[in-house]
Amino acid sequence: MDLFDFLGEDREARALDRLTIMLAGFEADSEIEQDLALERAIAYCRKEWGSYAAGLEALARRLEETPDHAVRSLQLREEGSEPGTLIRAIRLRRRRERGRAGEIEAVIAIYGGEDEAKAPTAFETVFITAAAHLSDGEADPFAPLDGWSLPWHDVPERLRRVVSEACPLPRTVSAARDECLRWEERLLHLEILYDCPGAGILPTACAARRRVVEDLWRKGLRAASLADLYARLDYWAARGGDDGAGYGVLQSDLDAVAAILGPRGGGETTKDRARRLKAANPHWSLARIGKELGISRQAVHKHLKQAAAPA
């Protein structure tokens, strides 16, 4: 290698170093500064290599000579073919981070503080305390209980009995769904707090309670109202699987609800049922009555208004 070749390579290396510094400007806090950094990088590449793409290609080739930079090389080539790609990716990443930060703040606000949000809630503590004697002497609420820790395995009878007695079990399908969704909301909050989408974990006793209640929602309770029927349908439509087992459960529910509601022809009308429910439960809201009947609160209001009107 003669002196001119050496000087040429040295100049190329310095130019690539300078380009690397310019590209670092893409991480600027201000979008205006990011745009200016892009303009400077494009102008510099045109001056040194004839085009922006050629400059980034040269930098990509140099990075390929170092380990663990294959992805960065691909990103540089993509930037060369579509200027602004790197900046758009950075802005998208920051928007997502801001969104996560907002979600975390919202979750913390629900519980009153970060420590409170991460600690077991009062509802969770009921089951943790009740099942503590089933552990192997560990104080860890996530430790196995009665040999059980995997939520997709059947809950042992002793553990099932403990979490069932610690707090009254739901007595209707819709109530079972509501509690199950409450557990799922808690899981979502934990996933947000720990930034682990799809990997939230409940304390073992709480996971057992959730499994027991989900079984009630799935098929363990017989539907006794249209609200129950819709709740059961919600389970099988969204998470019941494709083995056909849900059809038998829903058929049983339909038979039970049909027997309660009676035949449509000469039986009790929706207006009659709305009036009867209001008379039996004067403290119930229109929404609550509508939930029992499977109709909107506006429809309940209409039925009650018609029933109250003079003949």
Image (tube, grey):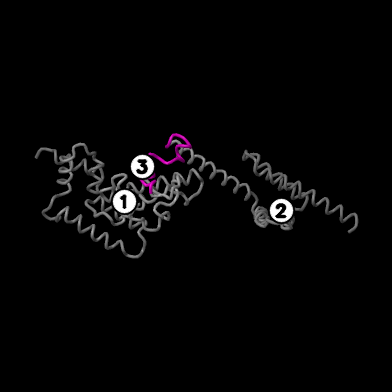
Answer with mark 3 or mark 2, whichever residue precedes in sequence.
2
Residue 184's x, y, as percent?
A: 39, 48
Question: Residue flagged by tag 2: what amino acid is it?
Answer: Leu
> Residue shown at 68%/43% (left/top)?
25
How far is disc 3 from disc 2 in space, using C-alphas? 60 Å
Residues in magenta, as a range: 110-133
* Residue designated by label 2: 56
Q: Main secondary structure of the magenta part?
A: helix
Label of residue 161 in the image: 1
**Number of numbered discs:** 3
Question: Residue flagged by tag 1: what amino acid is it?
Answer: Arg
Answer with mark 2 or mark 1, whichever residue precedes in sequence.
2
**Residues under numbered marks 1 and 3 in contact, where contact means CB atoms less than 8 Å apart:** no
How far is disc 2 from disc 1 in space, using C-alphas? 66 Å
> Residue shown at 27%/63% (left/top)?
248
- Position of the C terminus by quadrant: top left
* Residue designated by label 3: 126
How far is disc 1 from disc 3 in space, using C-alphas? 14 Å
